Amino acid sequence: MRLSRFFLPILKENPKEAEIVSHRLMLRAGMIRQEAAGIYAWLPLGLRVLKKIEQIVREEQNRAGALELLMPTLQLADLWRESGRYDAYGPEMLRIADRHKRELLYGPTNEEMITEIFRAYIKSYRNLPLNLYHIQWKFRDEQRPRFGVMRGREFLMKDAYSFDLDEAGARRAYNRMFVAYLRTFARMGLKAIPMRAETGPIGGDLSHEFIVLAETGESGVYCDRDVLDLPVPDETVDYEGDLTAIIKQWTSVYAATEDVHDAARFEQEVPAEKRVHTRGIEVGQIFYFGTKYSEPMKAMVAGPDGAEVAIHGGSYGVGVSRLLGAIIEACHDDAGIKWPESVAPFKAAILNLKQGSEDTDGACEQLYRELTAKGVEVLYDDTDQRAGAKFASADLIGIPWQILVGPKGLAEGKLELKRRSDGTRENLSAAEVLAQLT
Amino acid sequence: MRLSRFFLPILKENPKEAEIVSHRLMLRAGMIRQEAAGIYAWLPLGLRVLKKIEQIVREEQNRAGALELLMPTLQLADLWRESGRYDAYGPEMLRIADRHKRELLYGPTNEEMITEIFRAYIKSYRNLPLNLYHIQWKFRDEQRPRFGVMRGREFLMKDAYSFDLDEAGARRAYNRMFVAYLRTFARMGLKAIPMRAETGPIGGDLSHEFIVLAETGESGVYCDRDVLDLPVPDETVDYEGDLTAIIKQWTSVYAATEDVHDAARFEQEVPAEKRVHTRGIEVGQIFYFGTKYSEPMKAMVAGPDGAEVAIHGGSYGVGVSRLLGAIIEACHDDAGIKWPESVAPFKAAILNLKQGSEDTDGACEQLYRELTAKGVEVLYDDTDQRAGAKFASADLIGIPWQILVGPKGLAEGKLELKRRSDGTRENLSAAEVLAQLT
């Protein structure tokens, strides 16, 4: 992409309304624009990152055997009356009447709708286990939306729903999602720790929140320092095999949100020098809730003995849009964002330090063509801004590799390759740059 | 994908509520489920096709120089008061109040919001031309939703918005989208004819609807038969060059919707034997509306002489979810859907005609592994249904290539490869099947 043809409205000033660094940087880097309280438009740079994150979530759900579908944003109020949650949900639910005065709502979550879909088609235990997920916009009418996409009202969530014949099966489904979440967040360069958590309005008695430690997080958390260094399963993990050893390793070390924190156990189990009490950002949460929805909504299957039983369910959420904020909170410096390569909007930026000069223009064009031809996503800064402004923009938007093309280096046949994550620089030939990036 | 692990709820009976064949087939093939009037969940098979269509639309928008962003589904009513459309839009607009009694609406289109984004950042003609698009769910509260996804209430639309300094620039932008639309629909196997059309609530005085001829369509259309055989530009078309010859070729042959049909001109210009009067399905519409939104909403840029001028705009819609219905209307037979390969949910299906037999199981597994390894999307029917039911399902869901693996053929080292589009069959070795499909 040529910057001269891209839409990248970088702000020079720090926006006053942004209280935390990720919100500030997303606004400054031209990634989002607020359209109403807690409702954002995703500008091209922001959308590119959102889609990268969404795709990682999708790949790991698929790998764990979940099947993607897509439920609509609007739901019938009557469906929520079946579970009893229509009245229970409170003012966070956006309630709507259509032209025929039919009551709708903008889905804040989809337990009811997926249960309705399940019961319409699945009648036998032979079709289990089943895990269905979608990645769809949700709405929760927060009293006080803030922190940009971290606590928005319209937000993108991945929510999966598992259906099993009994509790043992449901726990295996829970474990598969547990492991998929470890992998999902690790692929984005995040250390997200599963912590015992309250179940809240979803219900049930087993839940973990996946939490990225950060001082700006909204949740207080307690954990044993050892949990920060546990290994994440690699892509060879066998989701059809027994995952209990992995789950045990992660859940036997103390880690809990403040809502379920047990101070006595914490002090007994964790040596003083290993006690961590800090704040964190919740990027995912998983629930086992048994028959909470299947019983009132009559989601029954015939078991092996022919008797009808209510299925055991769980649900599994990832805050896809919130993850942009969480990643920036974890990956930035004073100059701007430092995207991990897996979610970066572009892998590399070419900075033409003397736009209009035949030599630098020619070298940049050739490099741009060659990188693009090899499938590298590259942003070519071909604007007539001065070099300093180009450096600042590239640092701000956080492209992992910057290729600086100036007349002095070119005279010696060299470009400068800068790595954004640690600021290291190397003088390389164009061929070496190509080799490094492909 | 193994069918035994997929979620493909095929209906044996024809659903009574479906009036047209595409709606009937989408329900029977387990592609969609109605959740409320005109509001559908996309089951896994349907979602796979929706994503294929979405991706073709995206690729052709990008090729034509449009930039993708993503606006939220909900919008502030005040924004629509600026253009005067809040009161003008009528009961199709879903109006919503949030917990603080702030007036919102579920966007039926985005001219106002994109104009707000544009004016916030773009101040100079030097940043033009600009074309921004998104692919997002919209809501129009139809009085009588029907025909499945063809006239739904919550539907997926691609809408692009162009910004130019003057009318000449805006017409070039219009022409780029005109050509992009020709290519977009052709890639999906559709013959979509651009026809002069009314502008309706979007406004302006220049508009074309892209129409797929079909008896079940909702629009009456008139055209010269010659327009059906005009060539569609291939992928080498130069969007930065002069497109007027292509536009002239397509617009000089008579083609109009009934709303703007000129009977006298039709009879004068079109020889009687070439006159076509039929019905059609609108799959896209493009508009040039000049300063209709930029003037009231003050979307101004400084021109080359420094004077501020209101930009000239156009908007360009594709009915992404509706396209599934349109493609099925155009591509089906009595047995079911015949997907064009470019949008098929899977390219090939392996039908194991004797599940549980060592020979067929082994041959199917190997073929499944090899096709998958080569990146072919394949659905392996590994269920224990009898052969006849497998044939019927594969025909119904319309997979372009069916590979029939039975004991008799295997004894001779042969599989049967059936092409869904014309029913032709060939006996081939596994290696030949692989070569054909990769």
Image (tube, coloured by chain):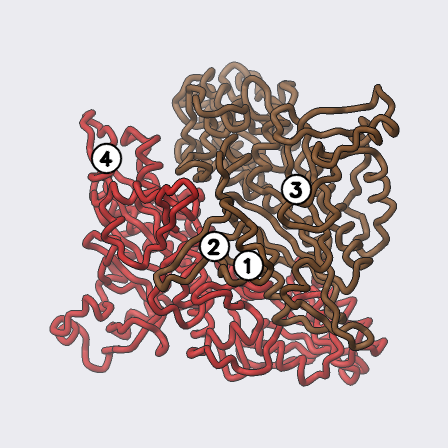
Chain colours: A brown, B red
Picture quadrant of residue A370: top right
Same chain for the residues at labels 4 and 1, yes or no?
Answer: no
Between B80 and B181, the one lying in front of the other is B80
Question: Could you give the CA–CA distance between mark 1 and mark 3, rounded to whole angstroms?
Answer: 23 Å
Q: Position of residue B344 (x, y in %)?
A: 55, 66
Labelled disc at residue B298: 4
Mark 3, residue position: A284
Q: Identify the element where label 4 is drawn.
A: loop
Residue name at image x 55 percent, y 68 percent: B31
Which of the two discs, 1 and 2, sits closer to the camera? 1
Residue B422 location, x and y as percent?
A: 53, 80
Which sits in the foreground, B429 or A256? A256
Q: Secondary structure at mark 2?
A: strand
In the image, A248: left or right of B202? right
> Sequence order check: which comes first, mark 1 or mark 3?
1
Question: Chain for mark 3?
Answer: A
Amino acid type at mark 1: Trp
Residue name at image x 70 percent, y 69 percent: A300
Can I make out residue B438 in this image? no
What residue did someone put label 2 on? A105
- Give the distance between the C-alpha atoms of the residues marked 2 and 4, in whole angstroms: 34 Å
- The subunit letter for the residue under badge 1 reads A
**Host chain of mark 4:** B
What residue is shown with label 1?
A: A80
- Precedes in sequence: disc 2 or disc 3: 2
Q: CA distance from mark 4 to mark 3?
A: 42 Å
Is the residue at mark 1 from the same chain as the one at mark 3?
A: yes
